[in-house]
Amino acid sequence: MTGTTKAKLLEGALRTLTEQGIAGTSARTIAATAGVNQALVFYHFGSVDELLAAACRHATEQRVARYRERLDAIGSLAELLAFGREMHEEEKAQGHVTVLGQLLAGAGTHPRLASATAAGLELWIVEIERVLTRVLASTPLGEFADAGGLARAVSASFVGIELYEGVDAAGAGAALAALEQLASLASALEGLGPVAQRALRHRLRRASGPLGGV
């Protein structure tokens, strides 16, 4: 019974965030959405912030697990960005983009919620970094690119685009198109012959040497 009640509260918290926003999310509204007694919020989680943090982790773990097989099949930057665009549409249709926006809105004034949201985003970053490390390894960029930093940049870009879309859908579409142009450039680099790739690596080493202290 405990597990069922906790599951109801986790789902109720996410639904409340989606439907009423962070300002309308309270022990009372979450309990009403979950169909349980308000006191159970505090019995199982101690506070509303703890419940929201747990719901954030729970939801992100589910989403990452759902997409992991597809991420494992990605073989290029173009495929990664195409997947990101497809996933964005799926997540938006299911209300997860709205939840993310509300979590980020609440994170500024709720430190525990901020740490939980950051931990949830880190789960995505780890998966994206794994893909980037794999797909860049065979390209001239693999030797120079910081996969971890790129993973954070990609994640931040998609989070920003998801939030930006609510006020400027055309602008968000243009941003996604620009990312796809970068993927096309990377694909062109992958298609270079061995001699051209060696020349490019040489130029990149010369360009990055002073910055790296070489």
Image: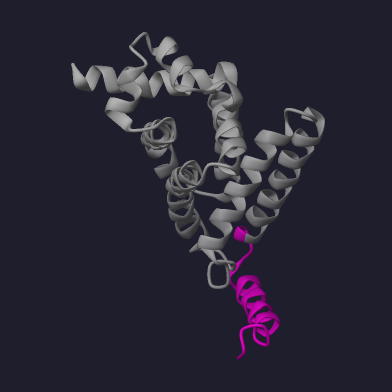
In this rendered view, identify the residue nearer to me: 110 or 34.
110
In x, y percent, where is residue 148? 51, 61
Q: Residue at x 44, y 11 (%)?
A: 33
Left or right: 146, with 50 as reference point: right
**What is the chief secondary structure element of the magenta stretch?**
helix
Q: Position of residue 10 (x, y in %)?
A: 37, 24
Say which quadrant the C terminus sits in: bottom right
Which residue sits at x=70%, y=52%?
182
Using residue 175 as the reference point, say whether residue 211 is left or right of it.
Answer: left
Closer-to-camera residue (54/158): 54
Q: Is residue 10 above or below residue 68?
A: above
Residue 120, position in %: x, y? 45, 43
**Rendering quarter of residue 102:** top right
Q: Find out whether residue 197 is within the magenta segment.
A: yes
- Point 33% across, 11% down: residue: 36
Name the image quarter holding the N terminus. top left
Residue 103: % across, % down: 55, 35
Q: Is residue 125 magenta?
A: no
Q: Is residue 2 above or below residue 195?
A: above
Q: Tell which residue pokes out farthest to the left in this image.
A: 1
Q: Residue furthest bottom?
A: 214
Q: Which residues are magenta?
A: 190-214
Q: Nearer the viewer, residue 201 or 106?
A: 106
Give the number of callouts.
Answer: 0
Query: How does the figure colour the protein chain or chains?
Result: one colour
